[in-house]
Amino acid sequence: MLTSAFGLLGVVIVGALLVTAVFARPTTVSTNTDEVALHYSGGPFSSTKWLNCVPQSQREWDGPYDKHFKYPSSQTNFVFGPGGEPGYEQGITFVSKDGIEMTVYGVANVLLNTECEVLRQFHDLIGNRYGAYLDGDGSRSAGWTNKVLPIYIGKPLNTAIDRASQAYNYKALYNDPNVKAQWERDVLEALPELVNRQTDGEEDFFINFALTLEKPEPPQSIKDALLKEQSDVASANARKAEAEAQQAAAEAQIQVEKANAAQIEELVKVLGLNGYLRKLAIENGQNPFQPQTDSLIANP
């Protein structure tokens, strides 16, 4: 009886295996030009094990229970500002050297390091935990958008901006394009180390960083005060310019009067005072030679 029971059990197991083999189908993966994939073995009777990487633009057929995880090889854009990443739609706020809270919009660009061994480590440490691999239609998953980007790009970026901003006053950041450009370079220089420190892996999971920061904005009350200050400065400059113009005109008139006086002095030397006065009268339409009554012959 015992032998018969074991025999029956063996038949059942063999039958189950045959049914599994008949209905199990091979798995396949097809990568686009901007995708790579990781291939893991698996199945009801085996443990999950990494096998190989699938490069861009390739199709593979693998075991019936194998799994494939696709990741983007193209640039990732982390947008902070209107229409940006979850939690970053209002931009990133920071405090300037002189204690003014400011807000900046922009975009950080980065590549996921898809070198095979590095990508496998990323998947094992981060990607698999958050389901950050691409969806079946090739779009970036919620795990990538809502977890990986905010945690591993957003937080380090926030820190980089905070640290760099401690070297600059808000007026310079707001008004001076050269200062703003240097501040942007400072942030970009600090960002890769902070990102890769956050991932806590042996390799750099993110590479090829680029950064574009818009003009940082102080609170509206500060902007209103700046506008008033600029208006006051402009008015003062206008008054100063007007006063300087009037002074210059007065000085020019004095020089003209001095020149005229010198010319009159020379004419007096040549013509004598009476001669000059007669000349002046003629020039003004007057007759300096009036008839004299003592020269007329009168009737006795």
Image: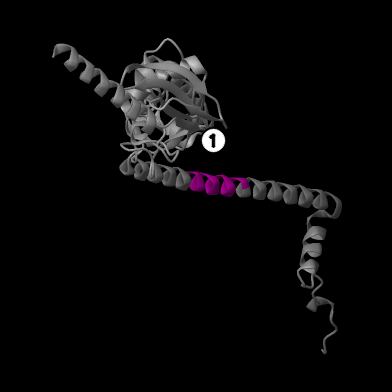
Locate the N terminus and report the quarter of the image it occupies. top left
Number of numbered markers: 1
* Residue 41 drawn at (x, y percent): 40, 20
* Residue drawn where x is 79% and y is 50% of the image: 263
Q: Is residue 6 left or right of residue 234?
A: left
* Residue matched to label 1: 32
- Magenta span contains residue 61: no
Label 1 residue SS: loop
| Vertical order, 227 against 114 (above or below) | below
Instruction: Determine the image quadrant of residue 126.
Output: top left
* Residue 43 shows up from this direction: yes
Magenta span covers which residues? 237-248
* Residue 186 drawn at (x, y percent): 48, 22
Q: Amino acid at mark 1?
A: Asn
* Residue 174 drawn at (x, y percent): 44, 36
Instruction: Determine the image quadrant of residue 201.
Output: top left
* Residue drawn where x is 46% and y is 37% of the image: 214
Q: Is residue 2 left or right of residue 240?
A: left
**Mark 1 surroundings: few (<14), some (14-19) or many (≥20) residues within 10 A:** some
Give 264 or 8, whichever is nearer the viewer: 8
Q: Which residue ends up furthest to the left in the rendered image?
A: 1
Give 3 or 139, whichever is nearer the viewer: 3
* Magenta highlight: main SS: helix
The colour scheme used to paint the residues is one colour
* Residue drawn where x is 43% and y is 43% of the image: 230
Q: Which residue ends up furthest to the bottom in the rendered image?
A: 299
Give 45 or 257, whichever is nearer the viewer: 45
Locate the C terminus and report the quarter of the image it occupies. bottom right
* Residue 189 shows up from this direction: no
* Residue 238 drawn at (x, y percent): 51, 48
